[in-house]
Image (spheres, rainbow, N blue to C red):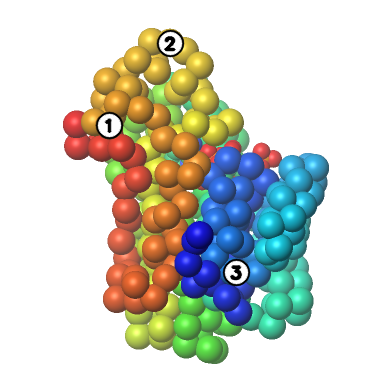
Amino acid sequence: MIYRRGENKTALVTGASRGIGRAIAERLAAEGYRVFANDLKAREAELDDLVATVRKAGDLCEILYCDVSDPASVETMAKDLLAKSGGLDLLVNNAGVRSVHEAGDIGPDEWDRMFAVNTKGTFLVTKAFLPHFRAKSAGRIVNIASIGGKRGGPTETHYCASKAAVINFTQGLAVEVAKEGITVNAVCPGVIDTDMGRTHLEDAETLRKVLEKTAMGRVGNPQDVVGAVAFFASDDAAFITGQSLNVDGGILFH
Ligand code: NAP
C-alpha cells in the first residue's frame, strides 16, 4: 500500500497519456493527489483509459487537453485547472518529443520542434502557475529532463540540447523562487521502455550497447521513474531544490 501523502493536494502531469507521464499520474493518484492529466487532444482515447483506470481504483483524475508549446493553450489550461481545483500543489513537466538524426540531417524545423515542446513547453507551463505558487508561498515543480541533458549523445544532439536547457532552467529558477516556498527539481531518466525509448530497443545492436553501458544491465520501465518524482514532491524533499537526479540504472557512471 502506497503512503497517501497527496491527500487534499492537486497535481498536474503534462504528457500523461502514456509512457512515463501515465505512470507518474497513476502513482500520484494512488498517493491521494487529485490528478489533472494533460496531453494533446489527439491522445483522447489514451487519456480516457487513464481516467477510467484511476477512478476504478477509487482515486481522482481529470483531463486537461493542451499543447504545452502553445502559450494561449497553456494559459487556458492553467485558468481551467485553477477554476476547477482552486489550487495546484505539484506541477510535473513531463511532455516531450524526441527523434533520431545526425546533426547534419536535422532541419531547422525539427530543431525548433524539440525546443518548442521540451524546453519552451516546460517554461510556459511553469510560468503559467508561478503567480499561483508565489501567492500561496508553496509549490513543487518537477521537470522530466534526461541523462541526455547531462551528456550529449550522437544522433540526438537536438534532443539532448533541449534537455540540457531544461536542467539549466531548473537550476536558475530554483534559486529565483527558493525563498518563496517553491522547490524546482529535475528527474533525468536513462533508457526507459516507452514508445519514445523504444528506438534504443528495437535494433538488436543498439540494445546490446545500451545493456552493456548500463551498470544494472537492464533497461528501465516507467515505474522506475515515478519514485523520484514522488520523492521530490514529498515533505521529505522540503530542503532539496535545483537538483537533477539520474534515474538510469548507472548508465552515466559506467
Ligand atoms: P512518450 O511515450 O512519447 O510520451 C510523451 C507524451 O508527451 C506523449 O503522450 C506525447 O503526445 C506528449 N506530448 C508531446 N508533445 C506534447 C505537447 N506539445 N503538449 C502536450 N503533450 C505532448 O515518451 P516518454 O518516454 O514517456 O517520455 C516522457 C518524458 O520523459 C519526456 O519528457 C522524455 O523526453 C523523457 N525521457 C524519456 C526517456 C525514455 O527513454 N523513454 C529517457 C529520458 C527522458 P504525442 O504522442 O501525441 O506527441
* Viewer-closest of 98 and 138: 138
Residue 89 position in % (x across, y down): 55, 75
Residue 231 position in % (x across, y down): 39, 63
Instruction: Report the residue at 32% width, 47% height from top.
Output: 246
Task: Please determine whether, in this image, residue 33 is positioned above or below residue 221.
Answer: below
Residue holding disc 3: 33
Which quadrant of the view contains residue 153?
top left
Q: Horizontal placement of 67 versus 224: left or right?
A: right
Q: Amino acid at mark 3?
A: Tyr
Q: Amino acid at mark 2?
A: Ala
Which quadrant of the view contains residue 12?
bottom right
Tell me whether the residue at label 1 lies in contact with that at label 3, contact meaning CB atoms closer than 8 angstroms: no
Cα–Cα span, label 2 and label 3? 40 Å
Residue holding disc 2: 204
Tell me whether the residue at label 1 lies in contact with that at label 2, contact meaning CB atoms closer than 8 angstroms: no
Q: Which residue in the rendered view is the most extreme toward the front?
A: 1
Task: Please determine whether, in this image, residue 55 is positioned above or below residue 180.
Answer: above
Instruction: Report the residue at 26% width, 37% height from top.
Output: 250
Neighbours of disc 2 within 10 Å: few (<14), some (14-19), many (20+):
few
Task: Please determine whether, in this image, residue 108 is positioned above or below residue 211.
Answer: below
Residue 6 position in % (x across, y down): 54, 72
Question: Ligand 1 within 8 A of label 2's CB?
Answer: no
Quarter of the displayed picture in which ligand 1 can be seen = top right
Which quadrant of the view contains residue 171?
bottom left
Residue holding disc 1: 216
Q: Horizontal placement of 237 versus 89: left or right?
A: left
